[in-house]
Image (spheres, coloured by chain):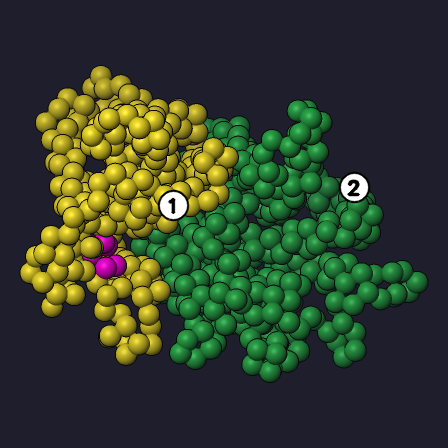
Amino acid sequence: MDIFIQQIINGLTLGSIYALVALGYTMVYGIIGLINFAHGEVVMIGAMIVLSVVSGLVGAHLPLPPFLIIFAGLAVAVPACMGIAYAMEKVAYRPLRKAPRLAPLITAIGMSIILQNLAMMIWGRNYLTFPNLIEPQPIAIWGATITDLQIAIILLAALMMAGLVLLVQKTRLGMAMRATAQNPQVAGLMGIDINTVISAAFMIGAALAAVAGLMVMSYYGIAHYYMGFLLGLKAFTAAVLGGIGNLAGAMLGGVLLGIIEALGAGYIGDITGGVLGSNYQDVFAFFVLILVLVFRPSGLLGERIGDRA
Amino acid sequence: MIAFFDTRKNPKLAWVGIALITLALLLLPFAAALVGTAWVRVLNFALLYIMLALGLNIVVGFAGLLDLGYIAFYAVGAYVYALLASPHFGLHWPFWVVLPIGAMVACLFGVLLGAPTLKLRGDYLAIVTLGFGEIIRIFLNNLNTPVNITNGPQGINLIDPFSFGSFSFSRNEKIAGIDFSGPQKYYFLLLAITVLIIVINVRLQNSRLGRAWEAIREDEVAAQAMGINTRNVKLLAFAMGASFAGVAGGMFSATQAFVSPESFGLFESIIVLSMVVLGGMGNIPGVILGAVLLTVFPEFLRYTMEPLQSQLFGRVIVAAETVRLLVFGIALVAVMLYRPAGLWPSEVRKRELTREDNGAAK
């Protein structure tokens, strides 16, 4: 039983990170129907920038509290990622808004390759370790342990998601975003500046991604130029699982995917009598995704999508 | 350009064109060998990728089903060949037996993927195919325990080359007074199969089935109303696309003599998709162009980026591998920005894009 609770805690932590990244995919998809393949790389760049700032400050031996150092890292990384996302949308996606559907997908793939290789040029090919500013303190709970880092990740993710929901539901920008998602032409006629709304969606997604980058880096303790790829893939899977284009769906999908993965990794060996090991963890996630989509073709919370493929 | 191939309207010019192209294709491996044997291998890869891209073009270009896990079928074909013609299981079946088996197994996997996903549309389909591709790769990577089937991440090596009796495609040999190296022999075999696949594709596109695919791509509901059995027709698209990839996979195994799961990652699927879209989705010459460009261009960069840097800056600043991919990414973005329908789009698509209203043109 304690393994079960332990895996739920681990899954919840990972799932909150997935959910944050998935929100970026789903917001962009909901508004312009594009799979932003480069979103995972934004997470990676966010993590790398935080790492550089934090390492720099730690190396300078200033008498700063650890929280302030991490905050300084975020203060650089979040605007930088937002800038990258803005530029990316403007250069690679905006000119193709009326092009065939697959054209922006290919530029997204191109942007992903560009960002990855730029990161490799700047930060090198090696695994970088994130300086351990605060030693995570384990807390015993129902026979399992949760670290304060895990609590911080889950709380911060929940807080940011709540903030996003408020933004989308209560502000003028949020209303404009929802209107644009429903019908861009009509939204434009109502006096909404579509371009601003789309840029805003990209930038909000990037801000969430930068924070997610910090989380995943501090959770695993390492960063790598390739880390965004699999994370992005998982997050996108989570977004689809929940019903792409749907904010609540992305959150649900992220948390579910994290828990499924953790439980899968924890139990797959026992269930199959040791035939399949935890290296099949990813198979588990994709298998669940396929099953869910077979029975609910638009994801868990997705609305029925239009008939055009 | 198209006039060169139109045997009906302009027979003389067409035959001259075909003769010139044939001659060029026959001389190409010898010209490439003058630059270096590596370039003959690049040509072989270009041919393999043409097969792959044409197969994917059936699924994405003709039927309009976005498939992001296409490389899985290539992997299946490659592993079927590797398992049935290598010391790994001690089996050494001849290639004309193994290649069709590979195609059939890949085809079976195509149906296996197609069947549960028929209801899905657009990007939901994309993510499921992507997941399917990853599942296949992860299984290939881990099926070395408890029974060693795929030999895990180490892959399988010493795979048999193609051979007819004592004639082996991997040896250097003198035929009719001309020296053929191993890769050059493979080139001609690959060329023959590629031409066959191109012919099949052209015939398919203009067939009843090809038009059914196109109808589904444009509007599935209308196609159904016209009496097309969308389920079977979609399954056929998956199955045929997959079997071409299966053949290409078998050829890949034999030419490389080595396979490992590393060659079949998501990135490969994405590259093949890029070939199809960048060349011009649904247009066979365009897809071929895309495949050739995206195979040869990165190789060209590999050999030119470092000398170019030393010329310009006096030293190599960034490694060729990094610049190569960076330029590749930039090229992908640039080409799509300037030619959103691809380098050589099909006539239908061109009309859709230049039309004034942008109603259904998606």
Total marks placed: 2
Asked whether A122 falls inside the magenta stretch, the response is: no
Residue at the outermost top position: A191
- The residue singled out by tag 1 in the image is A227
Asked whether A260 falls inside the magenta stretch, the response is: yes
| SS type, badge 1 | helix
Tell whether B219 sits left or right of A78.
Answer: right
Q: Chain B is drawn in which colour?
A: green
Residue B243 in view: no
Q: Quadrant of the N terminus of chain A?
A: bottom left
Q: What residue type is labelled 1?
A: Met
Task: Identify the residue at image location x=43%, y=72%.
Answer: B143
Q: Colour of chain A?
A: yellow
Q: Give the range drawn in magenta.
A: A255-262
Q: Main secondary structure of the magenta part?
A: helix
Q: Which amino acid does label 2 sit on?
A: Leu
Task: Identify the residue at image location x=30%, y=76%.
Answer: A274
How many C-alpha atoms fall within 10 Å of the one at disc 1: few (<14), some, or many (≥20)?
A: many
Tell whether A253 sits left or right of B71.
Answer: left
